C-alpha cells in the first residue's frame, strides 16, 4: 500500500485538524493509500525513534473537525537546517529528516504551514527528492499567492467579537478602547476586524502612522460625531511615521507582544486627555472553534493536496484564488509576501467609512 505523510508546522491556528482529516479521508477513500501523521512538525522525523502515528477514519470519529489547534502537535523551532542545540549552537539535521521520511516508507509529504515553514519544507524535500505539497495556514494571512490561509477567518472573528464586547464598556465609561491584535508584518487581521467591528482608527504595519492624526480623529469624534467613546485597533508590528517599528523584535525576530497598544494608549491620553484602556488579544486569536470558512478551505485544500500527489506533482502549494483551489509553484510562494494592498478595496473602504488609518 502506498503511504503518505502529513505534518503541521509553525504556529497553530484553527482549522488544522480539518485539513488533516481531509487529507486522510481523500487518501483512503480516493486512492486506497495509508496516511501517517507526523508529530510536532519536522521534529517528528528527526527524533529517534521517529514520532508518528497511522491515521484512519477512527482517528476522526470524534470532534476533531470542530476543534482548534493541531492534534499532531507543531513547533516553530523545527528548522532542521539550523536546529537549536542545548549548548546554544545550531546544527544541520536535514539528513535526519530525510532518513526519518524513508524509515516510515513514505512516498510523499503534505505539510501544513505558513511562509517560513513552506520555505524550510520545500528545501528539505528538494534535497531529499521527496514529493511535497504545501497547504497554507496562518492567522496572519500573509502567505503569498493565496487569498486565504487556514486560520485567518477564525482569528478575525475572535478580534471582531472582542470589539463587540469592548464597545459597550467604552460607551458606558466614555473611554477610548485600544485593541492590539497579531498579524506580524501584515495588517490583515487589524484591517478586517476594524472594518467589521466598527473601529474609528485602524493602525497597520503597511501604513506608518502619525500620532497627531490619531489624536485629531479622537478630537473630531468628541467635537463633531457626538460621541465620547472610540475604538482603536492596532496591529502588533505597526511603524510610526518615522518608519521605525514601535516595538523591538527579539532575537528570534518576534515582536515584544503587548507593547504597542500601551504605547499608543499612553500617548493618546497625553495628547487628548482621553481615558484609554488597552486589551492585548494575543494567542486567544489562534484558538477556538474553527470558523466555517476555515473548515471549508481546509477541507478543499486537503482533498486537492492529495490529488496533486496522485498526479505526480511536487513542490507546489494549494491556494485559494477566485473561488476555487488552484496549485502554485512553491518557489513563487516563498519569494513573495502577502501584505495589505494600500490602494486596494479594503483600505478604500476603511477610508470611505471615515476610519483613520493614521496617515491622514
Ligand atoms: O504567525 C502567527 C503569529 O500568531 C503572529 O501573529 C505572532 O506574531 C506570532 O505568531 C506569535 O508567535 P509565538 O506563538 O511564537 O509567540
Image (cartoon, rainbow, N blue to C red):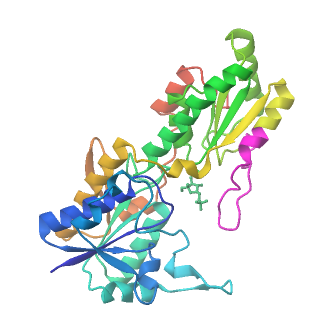
- Residue 126 to residue 242: above or below: below
Quadrant position of residue 6: bottom left
Q: How many labels, in total?
A: 0
Does residue 281 belong to the magenta stretch?
A: no
Ligand 1 visible in quadrant: bottom right
Can residue 307 be seen in this snapshot? no
- Residue that appears at 68% across and 53% down: 257
- Residue that appears at 70% across and 59% down: 249
Can residue 60 be seen in this snapshot? yes
- Residue 305 to residue 33: above or below: above
- For the N terminus, the quadrant is bottom left
| Residue 338 coordinates in the image, percent (x, y) | 48, 49
The stretch of residues the image draws in magenta is: 240-264
| Residue 336 coordinates in the image, percent (x, y) | 46, 56
Quadrant position of residue 9: bottom left
- Residue that appears at 40% across and 69% down: 72
| Residue 251 coordinates in the image, percent (x, y) | 70, 68
Q: Nearer the viewer, residue 278 or 120?
A: 278
- For the C terminus, the quadrant is top right
Does residue 258 belong to the magenta stretch?
A: yes
| Residue 339 coordinates in the image, percent (x, y) | 51, 46
- 288 left or right of 250? left
- Residue that appears at 39% across and 47% down: 148
- 57 left or right of 217? left
Q: Nearer the viewer, residue 60 or 157?
A: 60
Q: Nearer the viewer, residue 288 or 15?
A: 288
Task: Spot the residue most to the front.
Answer: 62
- What is the chief secondary structure element of the magenta stretch? loop
- 187 left or right of 154? right
Amino acid at each position: 500500500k502506498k503511504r503518505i505523510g502529513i505534518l503541521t508546522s509553525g504556529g497553530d491556528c484553527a482549522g488544522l485538524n480539518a485539513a488533516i482529516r481531509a487529507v486522510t479521508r481523500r487518501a483512503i477513500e480516493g486512492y486506497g493509500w495509508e496516511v501517517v501523521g507526523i508529530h510536532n512538525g519536522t521534529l517528528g522525523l528527526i527524533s529517534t525513534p521517529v514520532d508518528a502515528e497511522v491515521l484512519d477514519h477512527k482517528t476522526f470519529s470524534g470532534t476533531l473537525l470542530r476543534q482548534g489547534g493541531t492534534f499532531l502537535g507543531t513547533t516553530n523551532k523545527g528548522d532542521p537546517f539550523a536546529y537549536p542545540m542545548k549548548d546554544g549552537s545550531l546544527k544541520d539535521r536535514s539528513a535526519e529528516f530525510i532518513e526519518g521520511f524513508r524509515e516510515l516508507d513514505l512516498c510523499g509529504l503534505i505539510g501544513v504551514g505558513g511562509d517560513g515553514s513552506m520555505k524550510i519544507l520545500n528545501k528539505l524535500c528538494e534535497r531529499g527528492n521527496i514529493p511535497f505539497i504545501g497547504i497554507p495556514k496562518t492567522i496572519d494571512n500573509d502567505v503569498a499567492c493565496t487569498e486565504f490561509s487556514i486560520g485567518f477567518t477564525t482569528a478575525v472573528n475572535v478580534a471582531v467579537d472582542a470589539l463587540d464586547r469592548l464597545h459597550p464598556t467604552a460607551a458606558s465609561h466614555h473611554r477610548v478602547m485600544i485593541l492590539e491584535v497579531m498579524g506580524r508584518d501584515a495588517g490583515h487581521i487589524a484591517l478586517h476586524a476594524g472594518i467589521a467591528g466598527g473601529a474609528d482608527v485602524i493602525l497597520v504595519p503597511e501604513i506608518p502612522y502619525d500620532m497627531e492624526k490619531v489624536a485629531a480623529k479622537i478630537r473630531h469624534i468628541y467635537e463633531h460625531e457626538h460621541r465620547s467613546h472610540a475604538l482603536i485597533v492596532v496591529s502588533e508590528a505597526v511603524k510610526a511615521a518615522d518608519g521605525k517599528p514601535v516595538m523591538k523584535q527579539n532575537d528570534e525576530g518576534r515582536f515584544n507582544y503587548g507593547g504597542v497598544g500601551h504605547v499608543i494608549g499612553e500617548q493618546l491620553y497625553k495628547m487628548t486627555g482621553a481615558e484609554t484602556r488597552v486589551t492585548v488579544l494575543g494567542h486567544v486569536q489562534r484558538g477556538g472553534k474553527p470558523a466555517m470558512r476555515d473548515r471549508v478551505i481546509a477541507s478543499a485544500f486537503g482533498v486537492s493536496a492529495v490529488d496533486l500527489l496522485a498526479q505526480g506533482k511536487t513542490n507546489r502549494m494549494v491556494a485559494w484564488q477566485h473561488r476555487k483551489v488552484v496549485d502554485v509553484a512553491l518557489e513563487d510562494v516563498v519569494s513573495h509576501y502577502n501584505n495589505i494592498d494600500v490602494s486596494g478595496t479594503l483600505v478604500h473602504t476603511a477610508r470611505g467609512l471615515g476610519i483613520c488609518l493614521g496617515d491622514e
